[in-house]
Amino acid sequence: MSEAFRGLKNHRSVVFPTVVTIFLCSVLLCASLFALRGGNRLMSLQGSFYTVEAFLNDAVNSEQREQIAHELQTEKWLDTVEYVSEEEAFAVFAEHFSSKMISMVGENPLPASFKMHIAERYQTPQVLEEWIHILEHTGYYDAVQAPLAFAKKLSVWQFRMFFWPCVCIVFLLLTLALIIGNAVRLSLYSRRILVENMKYTGASRLFIEFPFVLEGVLQGLVASVSASLVVTFVANSIGEKFSLAEVALSGGSLPIIVTTVAVTVLAGFVSLRAVRAFLDLDRGADS
């Protein structure tokens, strides 16, 4: 352990750029994991975007309203249908606005409406757009609203939200493996005489490997923890300004843990492989 810390100190001109590079790669890795997790959370909320609100016009009487409700409940495209009366709509309005605003409104201006949720197997932007078009042309509704634009964007970006973060994660892990491996090899070659002396005095392979593996683990741990803290701070700052981003990025402990563990374990594994390859090569040269 003393040799590991001595190596980090004596070779700081090599160690510092390596740690900085690992830090930058870890930042991108953690950000990619946040993006992947955020995309997964958005997809889990996708069903809520396929809710249509249709506001009845004043000409619709109670008999027609019951007939409309029956037709909607037997529609195969719909999973649930909820009737919202004028009083219920005004009660929801009162929950979200101040008493001053309510007094300015006066009488209840809100119409009755039907809130419809499209069945899961029909949740596509095409079905949502067609259903809105059908409702608008029935003549029963003053307005029909649904987050159609957002549903279309989410459908277009669905593949990209998973493909590109996964590509970045694989690429960054390979890059980290090369960076850490090269740093350990440089450290080994600079201490070649020390390694040979340890071998000649009868030191075991574990005794020789341990300082170099510990150096790699420490570099990976420091860089990954620092990167995770930076990305967490940025993610929280973005979440405070954008509500949708807050939903996607909230509870980001998993990407932080995965980044720290993955980079640290990868650093230890690559360091071990590099040391063993060097010792095997050096033993072959001696023979």
Image (tube, rainbow, N blue to C red):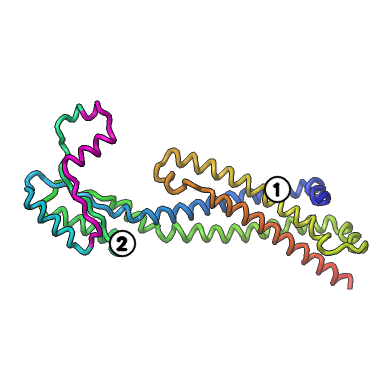
Identify the disc placed on residue 17: 1
- x and y percent of residue 220 in the render? 68, 52
Task: Describe residue 162's horizontal placement relative to residue 149 as left or right.
Answer: right
Pick the front one: 230 or 73: 73
Q: Amino acid at mark 2?
A: Glu
For the magenta stretch, what is the residue range? 77-102
Q: Is residue 169 above or below residue 106?
A: below
Q: Residue at x 89, y 73 (%)?
A: 287
Task: Work out which residue is located at the far bottom of the displayed protein and give it.
Answer: 287
- x and y percent of residue 177 in the render? 66, 60
Residue bearing mark 2 = 120
Q: Residue at x 81, y 69 (%)?
A: 280
Decide which of tag 2 and tag 1 comes sooner along the chain. Answer: 1
Q: Is residue 1 above or below residue 177?
A: above
Q: Residue at x 51, y 48 (%)?
A: 252
- x and y percent of residue 154 in the render? 36, 55
Q: Which quadrant would residue 161 be assigned to in this image? A: bottom left
